[in-house]
Amino acid sequence: MSEVLDLACELIARPSVTPGDAGCQALLAARLQRAGFACESLRYGEVDNLWATHGSGEGPVLVLLGHTDVVPPGPREAWASDPFQPQVRDGVLYGRGAADMKGSVAAFVVAAERFVAAHPDHPGTLALLLTSDEEGDAIDGVRRVATTFRQRGQRIDWCITGEPSSTAKLGDLLRVGRRGSLSATLTVRGVQGHVAYPHKARNPIHQAAPALAELVARVWDEGYESFPPTSLQVSNIHAGTGANNVIPGELQVLFNLRYNPHWDAPKLEAEIAALLDRHGLDHELRWHRSGEPFYTPEGTLRVAAREVLSEVAGAPPEESTGGGTSDARFIAPLGAQCIEVGPVNASIHQVDENVSVADLEALPGLYQRLVERLLLQPAR
């Protein structure tokens, strides 16, 4: 097996379901230390975070950002092979985390080893930041590390996240930003009663319906540069006792907004609270802010990534801000320019998650070329 395939298989074989790390970071830290990296373990609660750096501390700081945790495999009998026993079949590597994102993490490490071996006195700092809390609540992972970095005054100029971003072939998409994510739990209080005597009750479903209709019909904006329009989606509605002759005393609604830089979380929260107040609802709102939107404008990082991905894919990549969220949302507020570059995402979180071996073996070279374009550019 190739070096990166062997390392990816070692990582997949460790069942690091969020927030567990199952020894992945210790394995990687040992390798990086042998390559000359200084490694620091940042453990918060049940979450492991690894910060590995190589360089003088002067000049730009480039961070390779990834996660060693994976989502649960689901029913193992549904898999063609055990999700934590990696298998290669017909040129494809199967296993939980193959694409999201142990393949990229393995490629990061191999690329970093090769880069510092070829350029031991390189300008700037090359760093890897790995967490075991990306797929879960993301409280004690990169979010917490970013708070520590802010307190330390840690500088980060560029950040490359190895999330599986490609759509049909490796390198066909460059993620240059992400929308913000804001979730809400709305509880509307009524008065329970018999359906035959509605005047003695207050139906929270009926009361909330006009407000919910207004929320879902609202056009929040027309988009922002390469961002799509802000979207609100109701994901769950629950009320009732299970009996068809009882007016419920309470309604619970879950909804989420994916929003572009026209908005921030406090503004959206204020808008929605005002709308609900206007409808006179007896209600309670609980918010969860997953992260603000970020966007990397045209500049050194995007130019370098566009050049490298064009070489890999044979055509310029699509430059997108779509998709869900990533840990880059915690690094961008530190002043870093952030992009996401990784393998094809067709099978992530699915049964029989997989990555093409050819793509996996191309990733270290892709990442190494990106690092060289960014850190060695002043030396050209």
Image (cartoon, grey):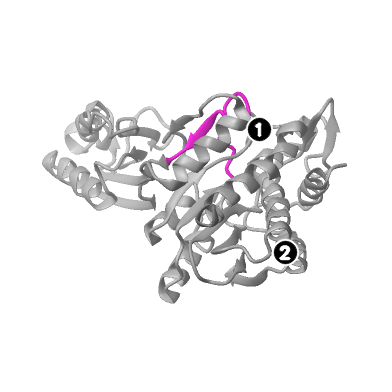
Question: Do we see residue 345 in this rendering?
Answer: no
Range of residues picked out in magenta:
162-176
- Residue at 34 percent across and 30 percent down: it is 228
**Is 290 left, or right, of 174 in this rendering?**
left
Q: Nearer the viewer, mark 1 or mark 2?
A: 2
What residue is pinned by disc 2? 32
Q: Which residue is at a point 78% across and 68% down the rendered structure image?
A: 34
Label of residue 350 in the image: 1
Q: Residue at x 71, y 40 (%)?
A: 98
Judge whether residue 169 is colored magenta: yes
Q: Quadrant of the N terminus?
A: top right
**Mark earlier in primary sequence (1, 2):** 2
Q: x and y percent of residue 23 in the render?
A: 75, 62
Q: Position of residue 223 (x, y in %)?
A: 28, 31
Which quadrant of the view contains residue 376?
bottom right
Measure the C-alpha gap from mark 1 to mark 2: 31 Å
Q: Position of residue 357 (x, y in %)?
A: 77, 33
Residue 304 lies left or right of residue 266; in this view the side is: right
Q: Is residue 121 above or below residue 188?
A: below
Mark 1, secondary structure of its residue? loop
Classify mark 2: helix, strand or loop: helix
Judge by depth and name the residue closer to the eye, 68 or 1. 1
The amino acid type of the residue labelled 2 equals Leu
